[in-house]
Image (cartoon, rainbow, N blue to C red):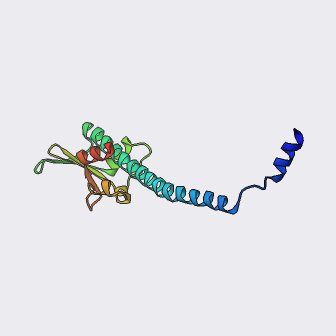
Amino acid sequence: MFKKIKKRVKNEKGLTLIELLAVVVILAIVAAIAVPSIGNIINNSRDKAILAEASNVLAAAKLAHIDNKCTTVTATATTTCNAGVIDPYLDGVALVTGDQAVLSGSTWTVTYAKLANIVGSDYKANVSNANAITEENLNLNLKK
């Protein structure tokens, strides 16, 4: 019995070149499909993180507005909360000069410099050239 098994094992030579090529081709196809998908996931995650930060800026501006820290122009009925006013209400989000939140009527608009870094066309469509987005569009994008 051992002799038969030994003879059979001895005759096994391993994989043929064709079998190895088939495995390599299959792995290449799987990699070609997976790599772009992973890239899209990473880009969407970055975009969502930027939008989440903009949402935090908006929440901080609302707190500053409640504390009467923002500047209100009565003639135009607009309230502006600039970066210096918002910053004490934020933790972990770095604001630059020009970042602000504006309340006009009942609509909040956030201007946040990092919105320029959004690459996904689904998200970019709702961001103005001035890196501003309304609260409504911000919430819609965060739900995608």
The x and y percentages for residue 122 are 31, 54
Quadrant of image for the C terminus: top left
Residue at 51% from the left image edge and 59% from the top image edge: 32
Could you tell me which residue is drawn at 54 percent across and 57 percent down? 31
Quarter of the image with the N terminus is top right
* Furthest residue toward left: 75
- 107 to the left or right of 83: left
Provide residue 107's location: percent of width, then percent of height: 18, 45
- Observer-nearest residue: 115 or 1? 1
**Most extreme residue toward the right, as rendered?**
3
The total of numbered circles placed on residues is 0
Residue at 58% over, 56% down: 27
In the image, residue 112 above or below residue 57: below
Q: Nearer the viewer, residue 90 or 29?
A: 29
User: As drawn, is 104 to the left or to the right of 90?
Assistant: left
Q: Is residue 60 above or below residue 44?
A: above
Q: Which of these two is toward me, 45 or 101?
A: 45
> Seen in the image, is 33 located left or right of residue 14?
left
Given residues 71 and 30, the one toward you in this image is 30
x and y, in percent, of residue 75 in the image = 10, 50
Instruction: Identify the residue at horizontal 89%, vertical 43% (top origin).
Output: 3
